[in-house]
Image (cartoon, rainbow, N blue to C red):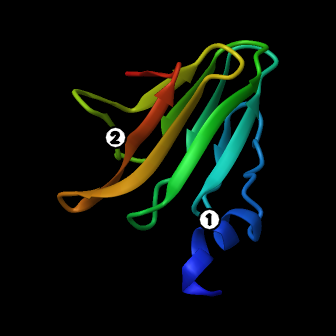
Amino acid sequence: MSGHNILQQLSREPELEIMDPGASGTIAIDRTLGVCPIVTAGAEGRVIAEPVRAGIILTLALKTDGGNATVTTAGSETINAGGTEGTQVVLDTAGDSITLISIPKGSDIVWAVLANNGGTVS
């Protein structure tokens, strides 16, 4: 990789899609800049795997809305959203998305919201 266009190389070289594990499944975080398109057939839940290091960027998007997708955190980590802190995000309309980044918080690594398009953090 060359330094002068590294962002362009990163955006086209790795596979960015993270497979939706289905209802009650755990979204495996095995790369940064991953996108997980979620498809629901009714009100369903997903779990985000605990971040293993700071700096991981993950986007969750409700691709097909058959019902609300409630995504919770796997461990004790929280989702920081400015003044709101919670352990879950609800995506309720196709096209809703939330982009998270793993950050250090005290001795933990937690998910923080980078961008939110329709998700409800609670």
**Residue lying furthest bottom in this view?**
2
Q: Earlier in the sequence, mark 2 or mark 1?
A: 1
Give above or below for 77 relative to 61: below
Identify the image quadrant of residue 67: top right
Tell whether label 1 touches label 2 (CB within 8 Å).
no
In x, y percent, where is residue 70?
Answer: 57, 24
- SS label for mark 1: loop
Which residue is disc 2 drawn over?
A: 78
Identify the image quadrant of residue 28: bottom right
Identify the image quadrant of residue 64: top right
In x, y percent, where is residue 69?
Answer: 64, 22
Left or right: where 34 falls relative to 79: right
Left or right: where 86 falls relative to 59: left
Residue at horizontal 45 percent and vertical 36 percent from the top: 115
* Quadrant placement of the C terminus: top left
Residue at horizontal 53 percent and vertical 21 percent from the top: 90
Q: Nearer the viewer, residue 75 or 55?
A: 55
Q: Amino acid at mark 1?
A: Arg
- SS label for mark 2: loop
* Quadrant placement of the N terminus: bottom right
For mark 1, does the 10 Å Cα neighbourhood hold few (<14), some (14 to 19), or many (20 or more) residues?
some
In x, y percent, where is residue 105?
Answer: 22, 55
Residue at horizontal 41 percent and vertical 42 percent from the top: 114
**Residue lying furthest front in this view?**
4
Q: Amino acid at mark 2?
A: Thr
Q: Which mark is residue 31?
A: 1
